Amino acid sequence: MTWHVLDIGSIWIKEFTSALGEFVPVMGWLPIISWTGFIQREGGEKRLTDPPLTCRTFSLPRGYHRFPVSLLSNWSRRQIEQMRQCSDNAKNSPLICTTPFYAPVAEMWPGPVVYYQTDLTFGYVGMNPRQVRAFDRRLCRVAAAVCPNSKRVADYMVSEAQCDPSKIDIVPNATRESNLFQYAPKSPASVPDDLRDLPRPIIGVIGNLAANLNWRLLLRAVEQTPQYSWAFIGPTGMEVPEAAQREAREKLMRWKGRVRFTGGKPYGLLQDYARALDVAVLPYRRKEPTFSGSSTRFYEHLSACRPMIATRGFEELLHKEPLLRLVDTPEQLVAELDDLARHGFSDGLEEARWRASRQGTWQVRAAMVITALKRRWPGALHVPEQLPGFDPHTPYPSGLPWEKFPKFELVTPD
């Protein structure tokens, strides 16, 4: 029996799949999308080291999920055959689909299917919402378990994708188990070499420095805090379409001295920066698909145990107080920073974040998915009896009349 994860293109799915592999045999599938994807090619096996993971590549034609490419390429049947070849017992081999566009594969797979959805896919620019909903409905019908990473996405699955609520378990994003401290630290760690010349205190923003961040708020906060250094750790290659937000980011990137942009860093090194900050800032804009998802940034900073300040641009984070502080304006952000400065950049919640981080690892998330499938697929699933301990989570409400569920509505950008 082999668990298949289709696909592992994003770093958070790679992390999840690697953790899953600590409990069950797993094969991650990495798509190669090209104009020549019509030509059938056998995928090659690869061994990744960061995180450790065995995967196979497979070919997809551009536009694989759109008619007539989906019909002419026959990609789904080719993928089924490749997965069968990597399974000693396909009927008992779970398939985890991570995007709605793999519904054609899920419908033909002989074993149990899990829909593990970490994004509000139709919220992305350029997506066809009607097509995405149709694929979501197909996957929700065939899946034994549906594991969205937030309540917002779960609400969408019920209201828009017509998912049976009894199938749903919410499985948020997470951090590496190796990022956890053995005990709660009382002060920040030493800064990495490329920040060593920045004077403390250092306020930091970590992750993809793209359009889902509120750059206007950040610029105004930096202008009002000459007493603090600011570190931005992450890639800046993604476009920021809104002119005012784009200009704010560009102005910050041109800032010298106490403002530092380090560029992108390997995922495994981000924790070194998170631990070194005096305060972490999570400055999200209130827009889709960000608002409806699960914040990987939050779980990285949670394990670092440093104080956090977040905007209200992530629905998940609205329920994380007092582990973080919430603000709406640059002035509120500055006021919170100054309050933390008066207390030596310790809010007294380091141990609370440390304890909470024990439940926020990819290993715990993998165990949650395994448990969700075990509950709904009785019989021949061969999985470990002992899985990592985690607090009993509350599954998405089931057995209620349809009208009791909230109608999902997109949020508009602030």
Image: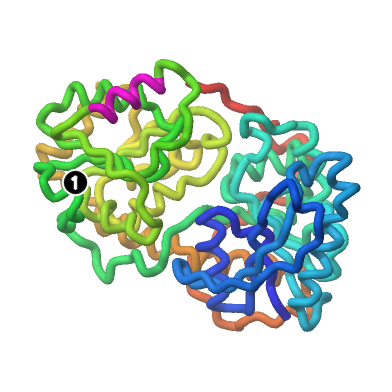
Asked whether residue 56 is in view, the answer is yes
Magenta stretch contains residue 247 = yes
Our reading of the magenta stretch's main secondary structure is helix
Establish if 151 lies above or below 19. Answer: above
Q: Position of residue 34 (x, y in %)?
A: 70, 49
Q: Nearer the viewer, residue 186 or 55?
A: 55
Region rendered in magenta: 245-254
Residue at image position (34%, 21%) is 248
Q: Position of residue 220 (x, y in %)?
A: 26, 21
Residue at image position (70%, 82%) is 382
Left or right: residue 28 compared with residue 172: right
Left or right: residue 106 compared with residue 225: right
Q: Position of residue 370 (x, y in %)?
A: 63, 70
Looking at the image, which residue sits at the far top?
244
Q: Position of residue 108 (x, y in %)?
A: 87, 62
SS for dot 1: loop
Choose top left, top right, bottom left or bottom right for residue 159: top right
Q: Nearer the viewer, residue 372 or 14?
A: 14
Q: Nearer the viewer, residue 311 or 216?
A: 216
In which quadrant will I find the N terminus?
bottom right
Residue at image position (79%, 36%) is 131
Establish if 199 lies above or below 60. Answer: above
Left or right: residue 111 compared with residue 253: right
Residue at image position (50%, 63%) is 15
Which residue type carries mark 1? Asp
Tell me the colour scheme of the image. rainbow
Q: Which residue is mark 1?
A: 278
Left or right: residue 3 compared with residue 179: right
Q: How many marks?
A: 1
How packed mark 1 is, by other alpha carbons closer than 10 Å (few <14, some 14-19, many 20 or more), is many
Choose top left, top right, bottom left or bottom right for residue 214: top left
